[in-house]
Image: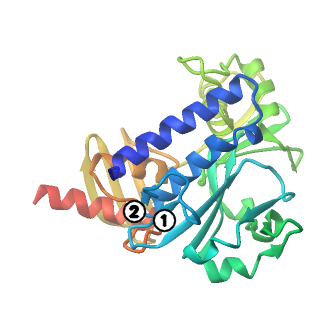
Amino acid sequence: MALTQMQLIQSLGEAMSWFEREMQWGVEPTELKHLCSRIGELYAAVVTNGQMAVTVNQKGYDVVSGTGERISVKTTAMIGSSGHISFNPRTLELVDRVIVLRINAEEMQIETLLDAPLRDAEQLMTAEADGKRAIPIGRFIRKARPTHELKATAEVTYQDYTLRELESGSIEITREGELVTPALPMLKELAFKLNVPLVNSNGNVFNTRQLGSLIIKSILGLAEAGVEQHGVTAAVAQQKTEENVRSIAEVSYEGLTIREMETGTIEVESGGKLLTPTMRVLRELALRLQLAITNSQGNPYNTRQLGKVVIEKIKDRRG
């Protein structure tokens, strides 16, 4: 029986929670191969508005998209550019599209390494000694957009460190102009100094984005209170849109105000404060409004596209 989009999303959330729990028990992410595969298939079904293959251990493909494409989904938790993804050449003829995903265990995010028609994916494949074909991970890791091109939605300085929450949701830490990587160990040290908990109310460990956001809020609170002895030297929060940037569409829904600016940017405001990252809020609104988060071709909307869809839906409900 086919699952609804909501059931797929709920199953994906449960699988991600189980993955996170296993890591808290000390299991290495790369040892959770079956769970990684399940997460990847559910994610691919959601973003393509499709369904899981109806046959258990279906040969060749794992998901059928909303447009009928048969998709081979490969998911890894390996870090860096080493390693490869293998394919069975005897079943590739059954595939229309290849999606390769990676679970970023530090931030608990799913990254898309490759999403291409089979003919394009085959150009990246090499022959293996065992007869299989493979794509080295280094071939399709997308170069990240330079962080200096991304707007910081919040920025604080504490002692020698500058912490930024970028519009992508990532947390960036620099010390004397040098990027600190990985960010999580340093965040844990700062959390200890600032008495910020490392776990939530359910005892689950915060990931990098969650912990970074909490630490930034804590430092902002110290700055607003004028507490200098804690080493706070600066705190800059995201400012509201300048008055000379006009909104061309604005709606209200359940205490939130959603605006489309003349620049094309989407803003979501609550109680006079902008909510960030915007995409996360828009996806939650899409779920409440029973809206798809992908277009008719199965490609995920970006922030501006999804914002427009949400605004139009709220307008329609008001009649």
Tags 2 and 1 in contact by the CB under 8 Å rule?
yes
Q: Residue furthest left?
A: 319
Camera-nearest residue between 6 and 184: 6
Please give the residue where the numbered disc 1 appears in the rendered image: 302
Q: How is the image coloured?
A: rainbow
Above or below residue 115? Residue 256 is above
As measured in the structure, the alpha-carbon distance from the residue carrying label 2 to the one carrying label 1 is: 6 Å
User: Mark 1 packing: few (<14 Cα in 10 Å), some, or many (20+)?
Assistant: few
Q: Residue at x 82, y 70 (%)?
A: 131
Residue 160: name its quadrant.
top right
Q: Check disc 1 and give the amino acid type.
A: Asn
Left or right, 140 with respect to 65, comes to: right
Above or below residue 90? Residue 227 is above
Please give the residue where the numbered disc 2 appears in the rendered image: 306
Q: Check disc 2 and give the amino acid type.
A: Leu
Residue 230: name its quadrant.
top right
Is any part of residue 154 visible from this angle? no
Q: Position of residue 90 (x, y in %)?
A: 67, 72
